[in-house]
Image: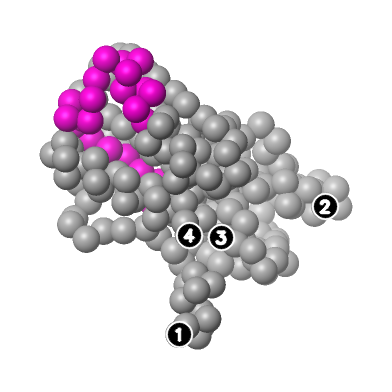
Amino acid sequence: MNILGIDCSGSVLSVSLKSGERLFESSIHDGFRHSENLMVQIDHLFKLAGLNSKNLDLIAVAAGPGSFTGLRIAMSTAKGIAVGSKADLISISTLDLYASFYRDFDGAVVPLVDAKKKRFYASIYHKGMKDSTELDVTAEALLERLQKEEKILFTGPDSIFFQEYAEKDSRIIIDFHFPSVTSTSLIEMGITKWQKNGPDPHGSGPVYIRKSEAEISMFGE
């Protein structure tokens, strides 16, 4: 089985290709220049594997929340490849993906995505189980929700924003070693979800939680 994983939800572009037992990975800190680099990296991995898009069986993509532009680039690229290759498409929540690295953590796992305007996208997990909706909250409001937790791990590429709180609260752990290659775990989660539920329905798209700045300017909040 040949599976492509794409994560453009943050500033790091992560792409992986799994072909049988072989795995090929690419991770670039490209400062959100995903539109320039995504297909270049996908083609590079195809060449390393000796494959092309028509050999794909499944494409797993991080659906958000995250960068509005990055999510659209990832989803439109994945859908375009899926149409041309007849591969199935499966999407995974970015927060679920980030939390998946710490299923065995003894406490609350809280993946974070910087939502700008001093707010964060977040969810709360215990032992791999999601115990909250996907939130759009201030740091203070999130900490209020976590006040009864004995141990808290903030993870994801934006967890560094909570370092000042960790310095004042011994319960808080900041994940300074979050992996830059997220697309490989995305593939594994995609396979599990696809085997259980089948591919995404036609018309599925990114998870935004909040309107983009352009939409707010045009239509209001």
Q: Residue furthest front?
A: 36
* Residue type for callout 1: Phe
Magenta segment includes 52: yes
* Near-viewer residue (4 or 32): 32
* Residue type for callout 4: Phe
Q: Are marks 4 and 1 in contact (CB under 8 Å)?
A: no
Label 3 belongs to which residue? 121
The span picked out in magenta is 42-63
* Residue at 16% in and 40% down: 84
Q: Which of marks 4 and 3 is nearer the N terminus?
A: 4
Alpha-carbon neighbours of circle 4 within 10 Å: few (<14), some, or many (≥20)?
some
x then y, percent, for residue 146: 66, 59
Say the numbered circle drawn on residue 68.
4
Q: Is mark 2 on a helix, strand or loop?
A: helix
Asked which quadrant contains residue 77, the reply is: top left
Question: CA gap, disc 4 to disc 1?
Answer: 17 Å
Label 1 belongs to which residue? 219
x then y, percent, for residue 175: 67, 38
x then y, percent, for residue 46: 31, 22
* Residue at 80% in and 54% down: 165
Of the two numbered discs 1 and 3 in the rendering, the one whose residue sits closer to the viewer: 1
Q: Is residue 128 visible?
A: no
Q: Is mark 1 on a helix, strand or loop?
A: helix
